[in-house]
Image (cartoon, helix red, strand yellow):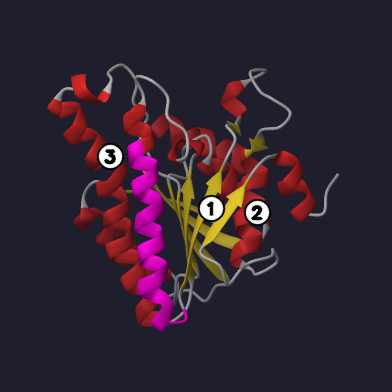
Amino acid sequence: MEETGKTAVVAGGTGSIGEGVVKALLDDGYRVYVPVRDKDHTERLNDYAGNTDDLRLIPADLCNVSAVSAMRDRILEEVPRIDAVVVSVGAGYFGYRLHKMPRTDWDDSIQDNLGTHFNAQQVFIEQLRQQNSGVYVTLIGPEAEHIRPDAGMVSIMAAAQKMMTRVLAEESSDSQVRVHAVSAHTTITTRNRGENTNREWIAALEMGEYIAGLIAERVPGCDKPLHDLRDLAQVRKILRRR
């Protein structure tokens, strides 16, 4: 086992929002482990992160709890503990109103959006509780509070993810493990959006910097499970930027 500094796991770290979290944690001195399934996304994340040895990419399918457990075990072969887990996982859905949605689409969405979170929580909350230390953060999109026609399933899943995290926070109150849900109330500006952005949208990297600050207790309300981020101006004010 290698001696190391801070260690984080970012589930969904190859995604357009998750990569901002990965970059922010790397900049904050973490060794970051990311489960991966897509080679193209792996190469994109490596390039964005600067091809650093502190970024460790591990093949793993979050839909398979055995694969998540194996990933945890592989991480703990290299480091003595896991300090933080950030989950930025969710599949979009558009095309059917709820009463017309095919059952197979419903089942797939449950697995992709809730099954993945359940697997990550089962494996990593148990690990953090064994350590009696660490921080678990779930990213929640604006859909949890807003309904779009033909995409209502996304709102249902986001709201469920938020409640799952609230339950975890309550259940973890008998330990030194902190659990947080960070909710963005804007669309997130990502690298792949190009010029299709709005100056009020929170940027993926600044979202990541907020989460790094939350883990390190550098932002207000670190004793609170829910963190609602309204817009970019609010986040920059918290990060002491103009």
Looking at marks 1 and 3 on the same chain, the residue that comes earlier in the sequence is marked by 3
From the viewer's perspective, is the residue at label 2 or at label 1 nearer? 1
Residue 170 position within the rendered picture, expressed as x and y whole percent measured from the top left: 39, 71
Q: Are marks 2 and 1 in contact (CB under 8 Å)?
A: yes
| The disc label shown at residue 112, or none | 3
| Vertical relation: 87 (above or below) 218 | above
Residue at 40 percent of width and 83 percent of height: 174
Residue 33 or 190: which is nearer the viewer? 190
Which residue is tagged 1?
182
Going by the numbered disc 3, the residue's amino acid type is Asp
Going by the numbered disc 2, the residue's amino acid type is Tyr
Looking at marks 2 and 1 on the same chain, the residue that comes earlier in the sequence is marked by 1
Going by the numbered disc 1, the residue's amino acid type is Val
| The disc label shown at residue 210, or none | 2
Residue 217 position within the rendered picture, expressed as x and y whole percent measured from the top left: 65, 69
Residue 210 picture quarter: bottom right
Residue 164 in the magenta stretch? The answer is yes
Residue stretch in magenta: 156-176
Q: Are marks 3 and 2 in contact (CB under 8 Å)?
A: no
Name the image quarter holding the N terminus. Answer: bottom left
SS class, disc 3: helix
